[in-house]
Amino acid sequence: MKKKNDNVWMLSIVSIVGFIAIWWLCCDVLKLTSSATLPGPVTVAKTFVKKLSSTAPDGATLPAHIFSSLQIALGGWMMGVVIGTPLGIFMAWYKKVDLFVRPVFDLLRPVPGLAWIPLMIILFGIGITPKIATVFLSAFVPCVLNSYTGIRQTKDVHMWVGQTFGASDTQMLWHIAVPTALPLIITGIRVALGASWTCIVAAEMLASTKGLGYMIQQARGIYRPDIIICGMIAIGGIGAIFSGILSLIENKIVKGVRRDG
Protein backbone atom coordinates (compact mmCIF):
# COMPACT_ATOMS: atom_id res chain seq x y z
CA MET A 1 0.00 0.00 0.00
CA LYS A 2 2.82 2.38 0.90
CA LYS A 3 4.57 1.70 -2.41
CA LYS A 4 1.33 2.42 -4.27
CA ASN A 5 0.93 5.76 -2.47
CA ASP A 6 4.55 6.64 -3.27
CA ASN A 7 3.89 5.96 -6.95
CA VAL A 8 0.83 8.22 -6.88
CA TRP A 9 2.83 11.06 -5.31
CA MET A 10 5.63 10.54 -7.82
CA LEU A 11 3.23 10.73 -10.77
CA SER A 12 1.71 13.92 -9.35
CA ILE A 13 5.12 15.54 -8.91
CA VAL A 14 6.21 14.52 -12.42
CA SER A 15 2.99 15.97 -13.83
CA ILE A 16 3.52 19.35 -12.13
CA VAL A 17 7.22 19.50 -13.04
CA GLY A 18 6.41 18.56 -16.63
CA PHE A 19 3.79 21.31 -16.89
CA ILE A 20 6.21 23.93 -15.52
CA ALA A 21 8.96 22.70 -17.88
CA ILE A 22 6.68 23.04 -20.93
CA TRP A 23 5.57 26.48 -19.74
CA TRP A 24 9.20 27.57 -19.28
CA LEU A 25 10.21 26.14 -22.65
CA CYS A 26 7.42 27.91 -24.54
CA CYS A 27 7.75 31.28 -22.81
CA ASP A 28 11.41 31.69 -21.82
CA VAL A 29 13.29 29.51 -24.31
CA LEU A 30 11.30 29.43 -27.54
CA LYS A 31 9.59 32.76 -26.73
CA LEU A 32 6.38 31.74 -28.47
CA THR A 33 4.53 34.49 -26.62
CA SER A 34 5.44 37.94 -25.40
CA SER A 35 6.39 38.21 -21.73
CA ALA A 36 3.84 41.05 -21.44
CA THR A 37 1.11 38.64 -22.56
CA LEU A 38 2.16 35.40 -20.86
CA PRO A 39 5.18 35.64 -18.53
CA GLY A 40 7.27 32.58 -17.86
CA PRO A 41 7.39 30.65 -14.59
CA VAL A 42 10.56 32.42 -13.42
CA THR A 43 8.93 35.85 -13.73
CA VAL A 44 5.76 34.62 -12.01
CA ALA A 45 7.79 33.05 -9.17
CA LYS A 46 9.62 36.34 -8.58
CA THR A 47 6.32 38.26 -8.57
CA PHE A 48 4.79 35.71 -6.19
CA VAL A 49 7.65 36.08 -3.70
CA LYS A 50 7.58 39.88 -3.98
CA LYS A 51 3.81 40.00 -3.53
CA LEU A 52 4.11 38.16 -0.21
CA SER A 53 5.34 41.39 1.36
CA SER A 54 4.48 44.10 -1.16
CA THR A 55 1.15 45.96 -1.20
CA ALA A 56 1.66 47.35 -4.71
CA PRO A 57 -0.24 47.75 -6.96
CA ASP A 58 -3.59 46.85 -5.31
CA GLY A 59 -3.07 48.02 -1.72
CA ALA A 60 -2.57 44.68 0.05
CA THR A 61 -0.12 41.80 0.24
CA LEU A 62 -0.91 38.36 -1.14
CA PRO A 63 -1.42 36.83 2.36
CA ALA A 64 -3.87 39.66 3.17
CA HIS A 65 -5.84 38.94 0.01
CA ILE A 66 -5.86 35.21 0.79
CA PHE A 67 -7.03 35.77 4.36
CA SER A 68 -9.84 38.06 3.18
CA SER A 69 -11.07 35.49 0.67
CA LEU A 70 -10.74 32.60 3.12
CA GLN A 71 -12.78 34.12 5.93
CA ILE A 72 -15.68 34.88 3.60
CA ALA A 73 -15.53 31.62 1.63
CA LEU A 74 -15.24 29.42 4.73
CA GLY A 75 -17.92 31.39 6.57
CA GLY A 76 -20.45 30.99 3.76
CA TRP A 77 -19.44 27.37 3.20
CA MET A 78 -19.90 26.42 6.86
CA MET A 79 -23.32 28.06 6.88
CA GLY A 80 -24.25 26.07 3.77
CA VAL A 81 -23.07 22.83 5.38
CA VAL A 82 -24.74 23.44 8.74
CA ILE A 83 -28.09 24.37 7.17
CA GLY A 84 -28.08 22.42 3.90
CA THR A 85 -26.94 19.02 5.15
CA PRO A 86 -29.62 18.55 7.86
CA LEU A 87 -32.25 19.96 5.51
CA GLY A 88 -31.38 17.39 2.86
CA ILE A 89 -31.51 14.61 5.44
CA PHE A 90 -34.91 15.67 6.77
CA MET A 91 -36.30 16.16 3.25
CA ALA A 92 -35.30 12.61 2.33
CA TRP A 93 -36.58 11.05 5.56
CA TYR A 94 -39.78 12.97 6.24
CA LYS A 95 -42.22 13.18 3.35
CA LYS A 96 -44.04 16.24 4.69
CA VAL A 97 -40.78 18.19 4.91
CA ASP A 98 -39.97 17.13 1.36
CA LEU A 99 -43.35 18.24 0.05
CA PHE A 100 -43.09 21.58 1.86
CA VAL A 101 -39.49 22.49 0.94
CA ARG A 102 -39.03 20.91 -2.50
CA PRO A 103 -41.07 23.44 -4.58
CA VAL A 104 -38.98 26.36 -3.34
CA PHE A 105 -35.73 24.39 -3.53
CA ASP A 106 -36.43 23.30 -7.10
CA LEU A 107 -36.89 26.94 -8.05
CA LEU A 108 -33.62 28.02 -6.45
CA ARG A 109 -31.50 25.02 -7.47
CA PRO A 110 -30.99 25.89 -11.17
CA VAL A 111 -29.86 29.44 -10.38
CA PRO A 112 -26.04 29.53 -10.33
CA GLY A 113 -24.36 31.16 -7.38
CA LEU A 114 -22.83 33.89 -9.51
CA ALA A 115 -26.29 35.03 -10.62
CA TRP A 116 -27.06 36.03 -7.03
CA ILE A 117 -24.19 38.52 -6.81
CA PRO A 118 -25.96 41.57 -8.35
CA LEU A 119 -29.07 41.02 -6.22
CA MET A 120 -27.03 40.61 -3.05
CA ILE A 121 -25.14 43.82 -3.77
CA ILE A 122 -28.44 45.67 -4.20
CA LEU A 123 -29.83 44.20 -0.97
CA PHE A 124 -26.76 44.47 1.27
CA GLY A 125 -24.40 46.87 -0.48
CA ILE A 126 -20.67 46.35 -0.93
CA GLY A 127 -19.19 44.53 2.05
CA ILE A 128 -18.79 41.12 3.63
CA THR A 129 -22.50 40.34 4.00
CA PRO A 130 -23.45 40.05 0.28
CA LYS A 131 -20.43 37.87 -0.44
CA ILE A 132 -21.12 35.52 2.48
CA ALA A 133 -24.77 35.27 1.42
CA THR A 134 -23.76 34.44 -2.15
CA VAL A 135 -21.24 31.82 -1.02
CA PHE A 136 -23.86 30.33 1.31
CA LEU A 137 -26.30 29.83 -1.57
CA SER A 138 -23.58 28.23 -3.70
CA ALA A 139 -22.69 25.77 -0.91
CA PHE A 140 -26.25 25.18 0.21
CA VAL A 141 -27.49 23.44 -2.96
CA PRO A 142 -24.89 20.63 -3.26
CA CYS A 143 -25.14 19.93 0.49
CA VAL A 144 -28.91 19.47 0.24
CA LEU A 145 -28.75 17.39 -2.94
CA ASN A 146 -26.09 14.97 -1.75
CA SER A 147 -27.59 14.54 1.72
CA TYR A 148 -30.99 13.91 0.17
CA THR A 149 -29.59 11.38 -2.33
CA GLY A 150 -27.51 9.61 0.31
CA ILE A 151 -30.47 9.05 2.63
CA ARG A 152 -32.68 7.95 -0.27
CA GLN A 153 -30.14 5.31 -1.27
CA THR A 154 -30.30 3.55 2.10
CA LYS A 155 -30.88 -0.15 1.39
CA ASP A 156 -34.25 -1.59 2.33
CA VAL A 157 -32.62 -4.65 3.89
CA HIS A 158 -30.88 -2.43 6.45
CA MET A 159 -34.18 -0.80 7.31
CA TRP A 160 -35.86 -4.20 7.70
CA VAL A 161 -33.13 -5.31 10.11
CA GLY A 162 -33.68 -2.17 12.18
CA GLN A 163 -37.42 -2.72 12.27
CA THR A 164 -36.91 -6.35 13.23
CA PHE A 165 -34.89 -5.31 16.27
CA GLY A 166 -37.54 -2.79 17.26
CA ALA A 167 -35.66 0.41 16.35
CA SER A 168 -37.75 3.58 16.29
CA ASP A 169 -38.01 5.83 13.24
CA THR A 170 -35.53 8.29 14.75
CA GLN A 171 -33.10 5.53 15.69
CA MET A 172 -33.16 4.12 12.16
CA LEU A 173 -32.47 7.59 10.78
CA TRP A 174 -29.41 8.34 12.91
CA HIS A 175 -28.02 4.82 13.34
CA ILE A 176 -28.74 3.32 9.91
CA ALA A 177 -29.58 5.90 7.23
CA VAL A 178 -27.13 8.68 8.16
CA PRO A 179 -24.04 6.42 8.61
CA THR A 180 -24.84 4.74 5.28
CA ALA A 181 -25.19 8.13 3.56
CA LEU A 182 -22.03 9.65 5.07
CA PRO A 183 -19.75 9.06 2.03
CA LEU A 184 -22.19 10.87 -0.25
CA ILE A 185 -22.75 13.60 2.35
CA ILE A 186 -18.99 14.22 2.55
CA THR A 187 -18.85 14.35 -1.25
CA GLY A 188 -21.53 17.04 -1.18
CA ILE A 189 -19.49 18.99 1.35
CA ARG A 190 -16.44 18.77 -0.95
CA VAL A 191 -18.44 19.97 -3.93
CA ALA A 192 -19.85 22.79 -1.81
CA LEU A 193 -16.36 23.91 -0.81
CA GLY A 194 -15.26 24.05 -4.45
CA ALA A 195 -18.36 26.03 -5.38
CA SER A 196 -17.79 28.41 -2.47
CA TRP A 197 -14.19 29.06 -3.44
CA THR A 198 -15.15 29.73 -7.07
CA CYS A 199 -18.04 31.96 -6.07
CA ILE A 200 -16.10 34.17 -3.66
CA VAL A 201 -13.40 34.89 -6.25
CA ALA A 202 -16.03 35.93 -8.79
CA ALA A 203 -17.87 38.03 -6.20
CA GLU A 204 -14.67 39.84 -5.29
CA MET A 205 -14.11 40.72 -8.93
CA LEU A 206 -17.42 42.60 -8.98
CA ALA A 207 -17.58 44.23 -5.57
CA SER A 208 -14.71 44.23 -3.12
CA THR A 209 -11.71 46.16 -1.88
CA LYS A 210 -9.63 43.13 -0.93
CA GLY A 211 -9.34 39.44 -1.79
CA LEU A 212 -7.86 37.25 -4.51
CA GLY A 213 -10.64 38.11 -6.96
CA TYR A 214 -10.08 41.81 -6.32
CA MET A 215 -6.33 41.39 -6.80
CA ILE A 216 -6.84 39.63 -10.12
CA GLN A 217 -9.31 42.25 -11.31
CA GLN A 218 -6.95 45.10 -10.42
CA ALA A 219 -4.06 43.33 -12.16
CA ARG A 220 -6.18 42.93 -15.28
CA GLY A 221 -6.91 46.65 -15.29
CA ILE A 222 -3.21 47.58 -15.27
CA TYR A 223 -2.23 44.68 -17.57
CA ARG A 224 -0.14 42.65 -15.11
CA PRO A 225 -0.55 39.01 -16.19
CA ASP A 226 2.16 37.93 -13.73
CA ILE A 227 0.00 39.04 -10.78
CA ILE A 228 -3.06 37.44 -12.38
CA ILE A 229 -1.23 34.10 -12.60
CA CYS A 230 -0.04 34.49 -8.99
CA GLY A 231 -3.66 34.84 -7.94
CA MET A 232 -4.62 31.80 -9.99
CA ILE A 233 -1.83 29.76 -8.39
CA ALA A 234 -2.98 30.79 -4.91
CA ILE A 235 -6.58 29.86 -5.72
CA GLY A 236 -5.61 26.48 -7.17
CA GLY A 237 -3.17 25.67 -4.38
CA ILE A 238 -5.61 26.49 -1.58
CA GLY A 239 -8.38 24.58 -3.36
CA ALA A 240 -6.12 21.54 -3.70
CA ILE A 241 -5.21 21.68 0.01
CA PHE A 242 -8.86 21.83 1.03
CA SER A 243 -9.74 19.00 -1.33
CA GLY A 244 -6.92 16.87 0.07
CA ILE A 245 -8.02 17.47 3.66
CA LEU A 246 -11.62 16.54 2.88
CA SER A 247 -10.46 13.47 0.94
CA LEU A 248 -8.58 12.24 4.01
CA ILE A 249 -11.64 12.83 6.18
CA GLU A 250 -13.85 11.06 3.64
CA ASN A 251 -11.54 8.03 3.46
CA LYS A 252 -11.50 7.68 7.25
CA ILE A 253 -15.27 7.96 7.45
CA VAL A 254 -15.81 5.43 4.66
CA LYS A 255 -13.40 2.98 6.31
CA GLY A 256 -15.15 3.47 9.64
CA VAL A 257 -18.58 2.86 8.12
CA ARG A 258 -17.37 -0.28 6.36
CA ARG A 259 -15.71 -1.58 9.50
CA ASP A 260 -18.83 -0.95 11.61
CA GLY A 261 -20.99 -2.46 8.88
Image (cartoon, rainbow, N blue to C red):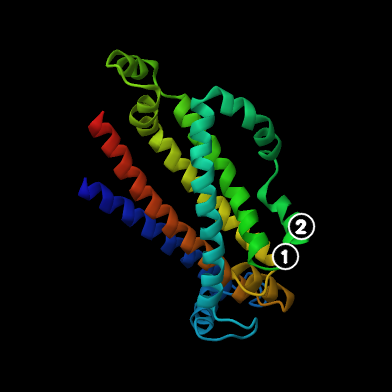
Per the image, label 1 sits on a secondary structure element best described as helix
Q: Position of residue 60 (x, y in %)?
A: 59, 81
Give me the residue at 48% from left, 35% from top.
147
Mark found first going from the N terminus, 1 or 2: 2
Residue topped by disc 2: 118
Mark identifier at residue 206:
1
The quadrant of the rendering that contains the N terminus is top left
Residue type at the position of mark 2: Pro
- Considering every residue shown, the one lying at the far right of the view is 122
Give SS at disc 2: helix
- How many residues crowd around disc 2 within 10 Å: few (fewer than 14), some, or many (20 or more)? some
Query: Residue drawn at (72%, 52%), measured in percent from left and top?
Result: 116
Q: Tag 1: Cα neighbours inside 10 Å, few (<14), some, or many (≥20)?
A: some
Tell me if label 1 and label 2 are in contact, CB under 8 Å. yes
Q: In whole angstroms, how far apart are the C-alphas of marks 1 and 2? A: 9 Å
Looking at the image, residue 105 sits to the left or right of residue 77; the answer is: right
Q: 51 above or below 215?
A: below
Picture coordinates of residue 180, whole percent (x, y): 36, 30
220 left or right of 169?
Answer: right
